[in-house]
Amino acid sequence: MGLVTCRVYTRSDVPPNDPIVGAGVRIYDETGTVLETAGVTNASGFFQFDVIGTPDPAPTCYQARCSRTGVAFTNPELILVYDPPLVPNEYDILGQLLTLPVAPDPLFCRCSGYFTDPGGRPVADAVVRFMNQFEPLVLSGTGVLSKVEVRTDAAGYAVVDLVRGGKYTATVSGLHDERLDITVPDRSSVNLIDLLFPVVASATFAPVGPWLVAVGAELAVVVTVTTSSYVVLEGTANGDMRYATADPSVAVVVVQEDRLLLRGVGVGATTLDLTRVDDTIRRIPDPAITGTGTAITVP
C-alpha cells in the first residue's frame, strides 16, 4: 500500500468523446467528507494526482466530483485505486455539454449562464438587473421600459432576453452593487457570464499575416478586435489591447486609431504579440488571444 499516480479524464458524453478542458476535479475519501486533492483538467483533458491505493481485491475507494460552467456532470463518481495497479489507474468521467438556448425573436439575444460561490456550489436566488442606457426606446412599435431583472434558480442558472445591440448597465448580487456596462451582441444567444465579464478574445487582420516588411518601410494593417461576448470593438481597441513585437530590433508596431503600422527595423523574423490591457477579469483557464504571434519577416 502506497501512493499511486492516477488520472481523471473529463470527456464529452457524445462520441468521439472529446476532452473537456478546464474542468474542476475534487477527489474525496469514500465517505465524501475529506478532500484529498483538487485541480483542473489540462489541455489534454486530464487531472493527475497521487493518492493511497491498496491491493486487489480490496482497492481504496474515492469520490471524484467534477464541475465546469456549461457542462453537466453526474456527481459523485466512484473510483477504485489499486496498488499495485492491475491496469493504469485512469478514469473517464463523462459530461454533457450544454448548448446555449436561442431567442425566438430575431430582435433579441438570449443570455444564459451559471453562477457558483467560491466553493463551486450553485448560487440560487442571485439577482441580475439590467438598466437600459438608451431610453426612451420604441421596438417594433412597442415601448421598452427601463429595467429588467432575472433571478438564478436552484442550479445557479439564469436566462434573459435582451435587445440585440442594446447597451445596458448591469448589477449582480454579491458584487457589492458594482455597475457593469455591457453591450449585447447581434446574435441569437450568448453566454451570460461572457456578457457581464467580457475580455478581448480575438483579433483578425487585413491583410492577413504572415507579413513581409522591408527595412525602413511600413505596412498598414487594419485590425478587427472581438470580445468573448462577440462584440466588435471600435478601431484598434487601443484601450483594451496592447500591441508589441517580440523583437523590436527587427520590427516595431505603431498603433493608430484605425490601423496598425508595422515598421521594418532590421533583417530578421519576429512576431506581433497581443495582450489584454485590463487584467481585472481573471478567467480559469485563460485562453490566449486568437491572432497573437502572427509572424513578421524583414528581408
Image (cartoon, rainbow, N blue to C red):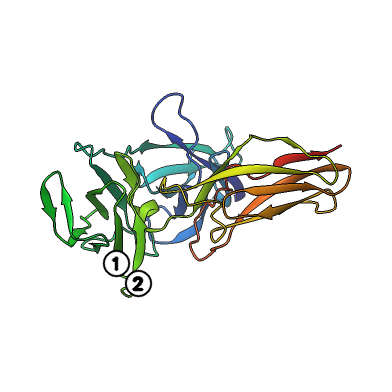
**Residue extending farthest top:** 15
**Residue extending farthest left:** 142
Disc 1 secondary structure class: strand
**Number of the label disc, if any, that sits on residue 122:** none
- Please give the name of the residue rendered at 31% of the width and 48% of the height, measured from the top-left corner: 165
Q: Position of residue 183 (x, y in %)?
A: 35, 54
Location of residue 187 with respect to 170 vertically, above or below? above
- Please give the name of the residue rendered at 26% of the width and 52% of the height, measured from the top-left corner: 157
Cβ–Cβ below 8 Å for labels 1 and 2? yes
- Tally the numbered discs: 2
Q: Position of residue 115 (x, y in %)?
A: 32, 57
Give the quadrant of residue 238: bottom right
**Number of the label disc, if any, that sits on residue 171:** 1
Q: Position of residue 273 (x, y in %)?
A: 68, 50
Q: CA distance from mark 1 to mark 2?
A: 6 Å
**Residue extending farthest right:** 267
Per the image, the residue denoted by label 2 is 178
Does the image show residue 193?
A: yes
Check disc 1 and give the amino acid type.
Answer: Thr
Q: Position of residue 63 (x, y in %)?
A: 41, 49
- Please give the name of the residue rendered at 64% of the width and 45% of the height, measured from the top-left corner: 292
